[in-house]
């Protein structure tokens, strides 16, 4: 099993790759060239590998083979990658749905029915989009919890935590706008809440006011946000997120304090260079600067190319896609009745339930204040928990507060499941 | 704490509504139809809407005699007749397909200009029933489920193949002696 792995390495791209310079060409530890590449083994070369080399020479894909610690290939450390896989599925299915969806209020609901009933595979694609969106929300939340639990947000990675929380918020916004697009009673009531919250925000909520563009249905504006504004912002943040991971490297596992010399997959001491020279200098500068990284930041475990992390995420993503496909076939969502103003009889999608329990208790403004408090808390995490200690055992206060917040959200969500929604809208 | 939470989670009284007499009778009838479609068991709410329609200061476009008949049918629990009568009261026709755009918009033949919804208007003229998520599984569904199984199995095989060489537990065990130093 492990013989298919490359033990170390991680070359920087060369200006003129030789015939044997393709990625992942070895099996097990191999001596490396000064640039870190495996030596020639012409017999193993395939046309596919040569094609990759041709592309790599021109696009520099080899730069993706920067080193990451071995533990990055664990499931828990692959949650961010799986969230990205979900995003790709959403983009693909969303492009198909956009060909048949009509955001005009009079026919929006009917066009969703057309997708479900008349478009080949339409019901499945809509269902896959529906379930993948919720999966992305769950995976992003689990990823945030994992990062919090392992203290991976700590210096120098605070900015990436803030970007991650922003992406989580955008995911929630995308789910909300997507809910409204189906333009059934639930969608219309969700929009009603949104408009009321916009009013509560005063001038800051201008975009949510129908008077902002009074001749344009707000459904059309939410549609543009769903298919353009939010995805563009998400992709910009994803790119910056990835670049910062490249810059600061995937964080070490807090449970692995100075585990000794790196080893090959077979357990032998790994005598190959840890990192390529420039990467080493990056790391050295990190370690010798006044950042004073704690001892557990010293990566001594086996390192693998980032492409192996992508490979592992791809394999896990295939499992995810299979599961989502099955769920999409077996549990396609219904299309609700066409919307009517003045009645309030539905519940929102479950990611919003905790907010609506607060609304039932304290009135509609509680959605706004509850949501604000939640995200302010998330954004404040790296500013409140600043000690260099990363293990959960050494951060009892942070762990207690985090656990309390998660339990609170789960309880509020479950309460909504057994609650008849109260009417709060004035529209 | 749980008792308090449970008490708070009980259904709450509605608020946020304005003077119902100012609501056009047609809107109240449309709301009553929406309640018949979404919460047919909530007879009190439906009755309230019909009362609002009858008390409205703007009864234009509504046949109140049909509304009275709908009230009688409602008391008898005949919900399909309630819906039919209410739709007749506002001149709407049942449209469960929702696919005929001109029908949905109620555009008379030859009329060049139609009025479309703006702002936050729902644009609903008739209330279509909920379209269920799934009927019986067909051959296409079976094919998709088979593809899902293949993808899942392939993914599991590959993710096992590409799993890390050492578990965190192994790495941690190796590091343990050093922690004691």
Image (tube, rainbow, N blue to C red):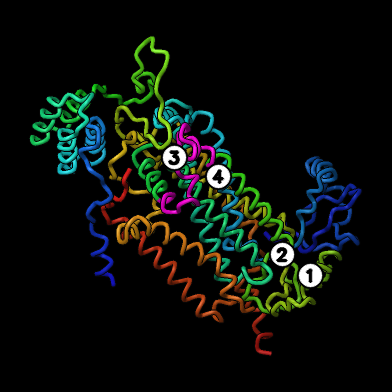
Q: Are marks 1 and 4 on the same chain?
A: no
- Helix, strand, or loop for circle 4? helix
Q: CA distance from mark 3 to mark 4?
A: 45 Å
CB atoms of marks 2 and 1 within 8 Å: yes
Residue extent of the magenta highlight: A197-225
Within the image, what quadrant is residue A143 found in?
A: bottom right
Q: Is residue A16 above or below residue A415?
A: above
CB atoms of marks 3 and 4 within 8 Å: no
At 33% from the left and 42% from the top, the residue drawn is: A427
Please state which of the two labelled residues, at mark 3 or mark 2, is closer to the viewer: 3
Characterize the local packing of mark 3: few (<14), some (14-19) or many (20 or more) Cα atoms within 10 angstroms: many
Residue under mark 4: which chain is it in?
A: B
Q: CA distance from mark 4 to mark 2?
A: 31 Å
Residue under mark 1: which chain is it in?
A: A
Q: Which residue is mark 2?
A: A249
Q: Is residue A310 left or right of residue B95?
A: right
Closer to us: A66 or B111: B111
Instruction: Check the picture and name the quadrant holding the N terminus of chain A.
Output: bottom right
x, y (%) of residue B52?
A: 18, 37
User: Which sits earlier in the primary sequence, circle 1 or circle 3?
Assistant: 3
Q: Is residue A41 left or right of residue A119?
A: right
Q: Which residue is mark 4?
A: B151
Q: Are marks 3 and 4 on the same chain?
A: no
Examine the structure image and report whether residue B66 is included in the region drawn in magenta.
no
Characterize the local packing of mark 4: few (<14), some (14-19) or many (20 or more) Cα atoms within 10 angstroms: many
x, y (%) of residue A174?
A: 51, 46
Q: Which residue is mark 3?
A: A210
- Helix, strand, or loop for circle 1? helix
């Amino acid at each position: 099993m492990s013989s298919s792995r490359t033990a170390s390495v991680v070359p920087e791209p060369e200006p003129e790759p030789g015939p044997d310079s393709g990625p992942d060409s070895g099996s097990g530890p191999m001596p490396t060239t000064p640039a870190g590449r495996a030596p020639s083994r012409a017999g193993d070369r395939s046309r596919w590998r040569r094609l990759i080399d041709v592309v790599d020479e021109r696009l520099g894909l080899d730069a993706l083979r920067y080193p990451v610690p071995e533990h990055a290939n664990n499931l828990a450390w692959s949650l961010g990658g799986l969230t990205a896989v979900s995003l790709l599925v959403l983009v693909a299915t969303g492009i198909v749905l956009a060909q048949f969806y009509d955001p005009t209020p009079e026919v929006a609901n009917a066009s969703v029915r057309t997708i479900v009933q008349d478009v080949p595979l339409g019901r499945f694609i809509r269902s896959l989009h529906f379930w993948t969106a919720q999966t992305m929300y769950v995976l992003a939340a689990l990823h945030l919890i994992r990062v919090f639990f392992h203290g991976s947000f700590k210096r120098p990675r605070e900015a990436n935590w803030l970007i991650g929380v922003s992406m989580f918020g955008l995911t929630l916004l995308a789910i909300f706008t997507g809910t409204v697009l189906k333009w059934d009673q639930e969608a219309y009531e969700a929009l009603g809440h949104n408009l009321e919250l916009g009013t509560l925000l005063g001038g800051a909520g201008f975009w949510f006011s129908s008077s902002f563009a009074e001749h344009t249905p707000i459904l059309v504006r939410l549609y543009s946000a769903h298919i353009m504004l939010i995805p563009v912002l998400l992709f910009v943040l994803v790119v910056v997120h990835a670049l910062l991971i490249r810059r600061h490297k995937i964080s070490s596992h807090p449970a692995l304090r100075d585990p000794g010399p790196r080893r090959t997959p077979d357990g032998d001491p790994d005598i190959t260079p840890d990192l390529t020279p420039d990467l080493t200098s990056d790391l050295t500068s990190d370690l010798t600067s006044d950042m004073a990284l704690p001892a557990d930041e010293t990566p001594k475990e086996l390192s693998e190319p980032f492409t192996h992390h992508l490979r592992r995420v791809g394999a896990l993503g295939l499992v995810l896609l299979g599961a989502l496909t099955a769920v999409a076939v077996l549990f396609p969502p219904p299309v609700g009745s066409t919307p009517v103003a003045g009645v309030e009889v539905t519940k929102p999608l479950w990611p919003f339930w905790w907010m609506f329990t607060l609304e039932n208790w304290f009135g509609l403004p509680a959605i706004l204040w509850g949501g604000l408090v939640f995200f302010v808390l998330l954004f404040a995490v790296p500013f409140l928990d600043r000690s260099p200690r990363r293990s959960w055992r050494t951060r009892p206060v942070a762990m207690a507060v985090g656990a309390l917040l998660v339990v609170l959200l789960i309880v509020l969500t479950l309460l909504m499941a057994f609650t008849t929604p109260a009417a709060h809208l004035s529209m | 704490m749980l008792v308090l939470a449970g008490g708070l989670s009980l259904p709450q009284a509605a608020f946020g509504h304005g003077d119902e007499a100012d609501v056009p009778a047609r809107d109240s009838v449309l709301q009553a139809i929406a309640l018949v479609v979404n919460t047919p068991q909530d007879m009190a709410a439906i009755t309230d809407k019909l009362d609002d329609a009858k008390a409205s200061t703007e009864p234009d476009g509504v046949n109140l005699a049909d509304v009275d008949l709908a009230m009688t049918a409602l008391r008898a629990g005949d919900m399909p007749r309630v819906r039919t009568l209410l739709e007749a009261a506002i001149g709407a026709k049942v449209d469960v397909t929702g696919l005929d755009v001109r029908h949905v918009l109620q555009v008379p033949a030859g009329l060049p200009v139609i009025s479309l919804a703006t702002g936050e208007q729902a644009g609903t003229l008739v209330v279509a029933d909920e379209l269920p998520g799934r009927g019986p599984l067909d051959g296409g569904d079976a094919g998709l489920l088979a593809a899902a199984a293949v993808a899942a199995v392939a993914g599991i095989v590959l993710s096992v193949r590409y799993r890390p060489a050492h578990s965190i537990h192994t790495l941690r065990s190796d590091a343990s002696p050093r922690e004691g130093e």
